[in-house]
Structure formats: C-alpha cells, structure tokens
Amino acid sequence: MVVGKVMDNPKKDYYEMLGIEKTAASEEIKRAYFGKVRQYPPERFSEEFKEIRAAYETLSDKEKRTEYDEIGALPEAILPLLYRGRNANNRGQHDKAAECYETILRLHPELDKIRQEYARTLEDDGKTGKAIETWEYLCAQCPANVEYAVALAESYGHRGWGKKALAQYQRALELDKSNSDSWLSFIHYHIDADELKEAEALCTKALDTVGEKATMALHLCAFVLFGPSDKTFAEECLQNIVRKAKETLLDEDNFETTLLVLINRVEDEESIQFYPYVKEFAALLPRMDDDLRERLGWAERNYDITNIENKGFDSLLYDILLIRNNYEEDSPKIKKHLITMECVLLSKKDKYYPLLGRLKAEYPNLYDLHKTFFDEALATKNPESMIRHRKKSLDKQHLRLVSYMEDEEDEEDCEPVETFRRESPKIGRNAPCPCGSGKKYKKCCGA
C-alpha cells in the first residue's frame, strides 16, 4: 500500500500552485489547471507538469481534497512525524512507519484519518490482529462511515474469519447500497475465495442496485467476470466503461491499470472482437508508456488478423500472420510450420501474389509482420529457388517440412499440398541404380 500520496511534501501548497483560493469550486479548479498546463506543457516542463497534475487530481477529487484539507489543518509539530511515517511506508519499512503513527496518536488520539493510515500500515506489516482492533475502534467511533466498515470486512477476510467478513460486508452495504466500492470489495472477497458463481451473482445484483451510479471499476469487474461467456452483456459493460471514462476526471494511473486489464482480456481469441472498445478507451489517455503501447499494437494486429478472412484473404495468410504476431519464430516446431506455409505460398504464385499486394495496401501493419519474406516473394522471378533454399535451411537443422491443409473444414476431402519430403532414401550418383539394371544411377534412372 502506498499511503500519503496526498500532501506528502510539506512544502507544496496545491491551492497556491494552481493560483486559486481554498474555497474554489470545481469549475474554477479545472480552469486554473488547464491554464497552468498551457503555461507549463508536459513536453517542455515535465517536472512542473507532474506537480500541477498532482495538485489538480487532489483538489478535483472530493475525498482527496477533504483529506488534503484535513492534513493541512494538522498541528505543525506532528507533520514531520507524518511525512516520516509515509516515506517509511513507501519504502516498505512498515514497522518504522507504525512507530511514527503510534507516536502521533499518543499525542492526538482524536485524529481518525491518522488512525486509518495506521491500520493500513499494520496490515502491510502482517499484524492483522492489531489492524482489526484499530478498524473496530474506528467503526465504533464512526458507525456511519462506509469506508471504515468495508475496511473492517476486508481485514476479517484477510484474517480468514469468513463468517465475520460476510456479516460485516452486509452491514457495510446496509449503510449505503449505492456505494460501488463496497460492492466491489465484496465481489473481490468471493473471487479471492474462488467462489466465482457467488461473485457473478453479487456483481449482477450490484449493477441492478447501484444503477447509473455504478463506477467504471464496477463495470470493469463485470466485464472480466462475464466476458466472453455472455458477449452481449460484456459489450454492454465495455460501452459503460468507455462512457464512464469520458465522464470521469482523468486519473492517469487508474486509466492505465484499466487499460492493462482490458488488453489482458482481449488476449483471449474469443474476446478479441471487443478490441475496438479497448482502442476507444486507450484514445482517452494523453500518453502511455512504451510497454503498454506495444501491447495495444499487438492486440490491434490480432484483431485485424481475425478479420482478414472475412475480407477475401486466404486462411494461409491468416495462419502466417497469426504465427508471426503470437509465437517465437526460433522454435523448431514453429519454424518448420512457417517455412512450410511460405513454400505453399511460393508454389501458388498466381493465387497468393495478388493477395499480398492487397495486404500491403490495406493492412500495412500486418504486412510488416513478415515484410522480409513478403517483399522477397513479390520481387522474385524464381520462386522455385526460394523453395529449395528454405528446404536446405531446414535440412541443415535436421528438420522437415510438414503437410499444410489449406481448407481445414474440408480436410477429409482435401489432398495435402506437397510437403517436399523425399519418398525414398537418398541415392548417390555413383551408387547402383535401384531399378536393377546393374548400371550406376547417374547413367541410368538418374541420367
């Protein structure tokens, strides 16, 4: 757990940074933020932009702003202890952080927000019993606080107290049935217990109960649980995710995490059809790291590959592209299958060369997957020489070409294409001819 992302540097005043009053309304905060971004564009002032964005994300979120204001109102004498505890937590030194929080609470036992951070720290330090005692105290002090009620339920679950956890989740929902985070935590409790049926039923109930107030995270959870088994419902969830994302103030970390989950889901061949929604969601991110961009490109190529057969492209091209996008080429098994398909393509020039031209024009991103071979095939005037070269390269690795069925649906009625496999042992030119003539092979059948 990372605590203290809000105001973890005592020298930063977010209101002053944005040039607004502490009473500023949300529209004023937004206008001030965009004004500062124009003044400090991220491509030129990366560090300044990070600070401006942190200020905006804090002050534009009601809960974060409340916490920021509460921490800012704390006695100055305890602030160094608070920052020391938060920094220790962020370094993973939870025992040292707990000591700082304990010192603060001895001086100011009325600071419930500090006690909340203390409870989280105890959980991270593996002291679940003490954490439960702390959450129980907070729940007794603030019985209407949903966040404390859910945190106590989660602590019971981590401790393995199933019955207490279930009862506490029910109490949390009774406090506010429209709270998406409460439902989401309860759903994940069942997922962690490998109770997927219960999780699915609870997720359906949550969406029905919360309705329009359902968060992007709740819709994402529903998509993960139900797609691809219920494609119609999964598509509805994705539509809601994109809609909620457009309505939500950008939290870049949260958006990136959501995008990663969506990309992971469309890795499944049965879910690749949902890629357009993933692409639409990704477009909302002003920037993303190289790894995420690469994975998004991989998903887009797989989506295009699944659609090319419906646009008049042959299954052989589909198979070549699928291998190049999803498998390591240096695997011997993959290599011999790929080279076999290359040889089939080269042996049927009239059929495949026009399709290669179309692929290059309509799907350059797919053409580039196997560009070296495709370019060579289109340019060559001697495809037979390319076939012989590929066969020899496999012979050197003691591999053989395999049979490739071009029409898998009619496999029983199809003859396999030529596999370029020798039907009999190799015969030397000076060896006796196998026909029985008594002559050398080079002067008889091998002439």
Image: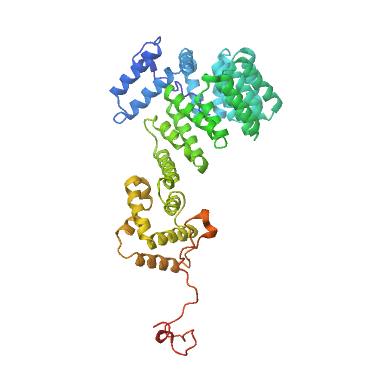
User: Which residue occupies the foreground of this view, 288 or 117?
Assistant: 288
Instruction: Measuring from the top left, give residue 196's x and y in whole percent.
Output: 63, 34
Is residue 326 visible in this depiction of the protein?
Answer: yes
In percent of the image, x 52 and y 56: which residue is there? 410
Hey, which residue is sitting farthest front in the picture?
Answer: 413
Q: Is residue 5 left or right of residue 110?
A: left
Q: Is residue 371 above or below residue 431?
A: above
Hey, which residue is sitting farthest bottom in the picture?
Answer: 438
Colour scheme shown:
rainbow
Hey, which residue is sitting farthest right in the picture?
Answer: 163
In percent of the image, x 71 and y 26: which residue is there? 163
User: Which residue occupies the foreground of this view, 405 or 103?
Assistant: 405
Q: Is residue 321 above or below residue 210?
A: below
In this figure, what is the number of numbered marks?
0
Q: Is residue 199 above or below residue 33?
A: below
Tell me where residue 297 sits by quadrant: top left
Q: Quadrant of the C terminus?
A: bottom left
Q: Is residue 222 left or right of residue 24?
A: right
Is residue 13 visible in this depiction of the protein?
Answer: no
Instruction: Measuring from the top left, give residue 415's x and y in whole percent.
Output: 50, 63
Q: Is residue 383 above or below residue 303?
A: below
Instruction: Measuring from the top left, give residue 73's x and y in whole percent.
Output: 47, 12
